Amino acid sequence: MTLKKKLTTAVATAALFMNFALPVAAQTISGNNSDSENYINTDVDYDFDLDQNNDADVENSVNISLDSGGNKVKDVVGGEVEIETGDLEAGVQVMNQLNMNVASFDVCGSCGMTGDFKIADNNSGSDNDIDYDYESDFDLDQDNDADVENDVDVTGKTGDNEVDDTMNGDVSVKTGDVTVNPIIIKNALNANWAVVSSSDEEEDGVSAWILGNNSDSDNFINLDFDHDTDVDQDNDADVENDVAVSAKTGYNDVDDVAGAGVSIDTGDVEVGVMIDTMANFNMAAVEDCCFLGDQETKIADNNVDSDNDIEVDLDLDFELDQDNDFDCGTSKGWFDNFLRGYEGGSDCNEVDVTGGTGDNEVEDAAAGGHDPEITTGDAAAAVQLSTSANVNVEGGAGVDFDVDFGEVADMLGDLFDLLD
């Protein structure tokens, strides 16, 4: 008897690529006559806020019970008795691939620090002002919350045969193998990937000129650039894996055999368990794309008693927060410990394997020259546990994101195709 089960959960929730570009500012006050007042005031406020949130609660429960044998033979005279029970094989695969955020942005165009500003060739006594205020805020929040509980119970038993009261006929009992292999639980949970980069185009920079204005003119250029980039990446994963395996072959009972031989042969037991949990990965690559390119400020060829001022104020702020919280297993409070006898809660990976071959019994066998023969098979168990959690990476936009999320990556590829 063979039984294999596979459970797969895959969630890819967000894939977003954006490119922002704003026009270059060009502001000029020129050629105005005497005693005129000329004023350009520009206030640009650019805000971008993106929230990517995933919340997954998964509970997988697998119960398998396999039984071969349980035969009973009684009161046989003058004939051979032969019992053979089959093999048992079970395999379980549970895969949870949950919560992935991807965001890629070219925001250099939104920093606003390009443009040409000029006050030139205005007549005497004129008052000329250019006031340019640019403020941009870029906020990206990526949040994942995964709660996963995997419970796998497998019971496989072959044998448990009984032969009673036989005469003048050989008794042969053979039980098969029990294989519970593989049991695989793989959890890939919570990944954030963010790239905030510059475009391939070279920035033009800022030029501010006060040129050729006549006497007693008042000329003022004020440029204020303020850019804030805030990236928050948060992961919270709670995982509990519980595997219980009971695999047995044999447990045969032969009683009261006269005048014949007895042979009991039990098979092998093989159990294999692998649990792999990978949780909480943050990668943020942010380039310093908002610094000025070529900056040119010039006050020249203005006449006597003119008042000429250029002020440039640049404020750039970048904040990155990467937080991971990983809990594997469950904790119990003092009341539960006292009332139910818990000792601090469950383990991160709790694996209980019981394997048995043999436990056969022969009683009251009488046959000259025919000694009872009992052969028991091998029993083998292998358990592999791997847990990797909480990784933060911050670097330039050239950092490769190479964490293998299997089917999630394929799903993201399909989403990217839709966005093209």
Image (cartoon, rainbow, N blue to C red):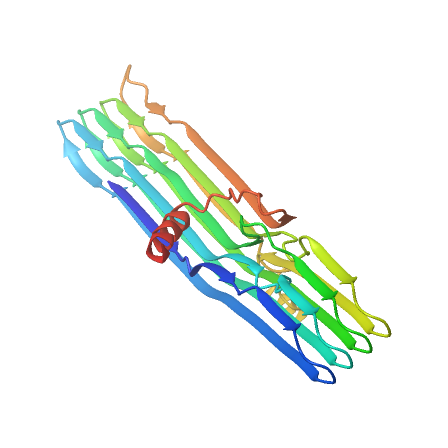
Task: Tell me where residue 337 appears, x and y as whole percent.
Answer: 64, 66
Q: Residue at x 51, y 42 (%)?
A: 402
Q: Quadrant of residue 304?
A: bottom right
Quarter in which the C terminus is drawn:
bottom left
Q: Considering only vertical position in the picture, is 226 above or below 106?
A: below
Task: Tell me where residue 348 appears, x and y as whole percent.
Answer: 57, 52
Viewer-side residue, 360 vs 414: 414
Q: Quadrant of residue 75?
A: top left
Task: Tell me where residue 121 appears, x and y as whole percent.
Answer: 70, 70
In the rendered view, does 70 fall on the left or right side of 155?
Answer: left
Q: Residue at x 29, y 44 (%)?
A: 4
Q: Quadrant of residue 323?
A: bottom right
Viewer-side residue, 395 vs 183: 395
Q: Residue at x 54, y 50 (%)?
A: 201
In the rendered view, does 114 fall on the left or right side of 370?
Answer: right
Residue 98 in view, yes or no: yes
Q: Residue furthest top?
A: 369
Q: Residue at x 78, y 63 (%)?
A: 301
Q: Considering only vertical position in the picture, is 31 above or below 179?
A: below
Quarter in which the N terminus is drawn:
top left
Residue 62 in view, yes or no: no
